[in-house]
Image (cartoon, helix red, strand yellow):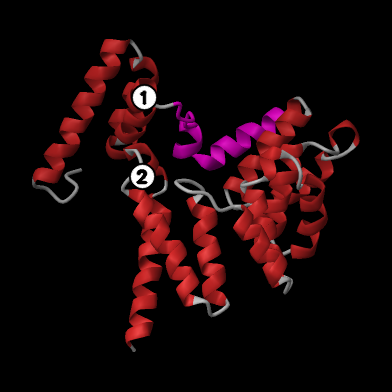
Amino acid sequence: MFYGGGSYYYLIIGLQIFCAIHCLRRGTQGRWLWIIIVLPVLGSLIYIYQEILSNRRFNAPKINIGAVINPGGNIKKLEDELNFTDTFANRMKLADAYLAAGQTEKAADLYKTSLTGAFAENEHGLMQLIIAYYELQLYEEVIPIAKKLYKIPQFARSKAHLAYAMSLEELGQLDEAENEFKAMKGRYSYFEQRYQYGLFLLRNDRETDAWTIFSDMLNEEQHLSQMEKRSNSKWFSLAKAEIKKIAAQQKA
């Protein structure tokens, strides 16, 4: 496959060769070589991220290669593991996989049925259940769980906390929602939470305040490391788009 021909093709070939030589020298060809060959672009990028960047500078999370290549197969594997050994840990792994794959109802059901007995107060499961309930638009179900977790440190600026703030908004509790958004603000961090706060302000006709939120995010971007910029690039791009929209509305 020539990917449109031209220099782009040779760039991909060069990337494959670089990754292949690197993994051969490290003795990891058994794990990586076929991935680099079968998936020239994606496989090479995953290899560079996981085997070069993370090992040199960053304490980066490991990528589940099987889940990237075949998410359905990964879920089937986790389902088989749970059928063979029905443990709380296996239940959480499968529920997390369902949630990540967009099978939110399955995820919510599995979290709910697993959070019983000795595991009724499990923080990970409860926070994931909050996210699932929010995605299912079961906003009233979110509130009591969030209040139960509110004082634990892990909840402070988590995605579950964000889902709690947005659930409060959906239920018309705007002052309470804004208080939660404000609690998640922080300089040089928590860009998803701050972006969502900006959207909240826009939805409530507070364009100037939203502009400030988005501008602060973009001003901080230039001071971040390359890894931090890449990991938050989605939120910076979205913030730029919102600033352009606000500017266009002000000119109209």
Q: Residue at x 19, y 47 (%)?
A: 3
Whether residue 13 is visible, yes or no, is yes
Residue 12 in percent (x, y) is at: 19, 37
Determine whether the residue tagged by mark 2 lies in a helix, strand or loop. Answer: helix
Residue nearest the observer in this picture, 109 or 209:
209
Q: Is residue 199 depicted above or below 86 in this figure?
A: below
Q: Give residue 15's quadrant in the image.
A: top left
The quadrant in which the C terminus is found is bottom left
Q: Is 69 contained in the magenta span?
A: yes
Mark sitting on residue 229: 2
Which residue has dot 1 on it?
Answer: 57
Residue 70 in percent (x, y) is at: 49, 39
Residue 108 in percent (x, y) is at: 74, 50
Q: Are marks 1 and 2 in contact (CB under 8 Å)?
A: no
Q: Which residues are magenta?
A: 59-81
Residue 231 in percent (x, y) is at: 41, 43
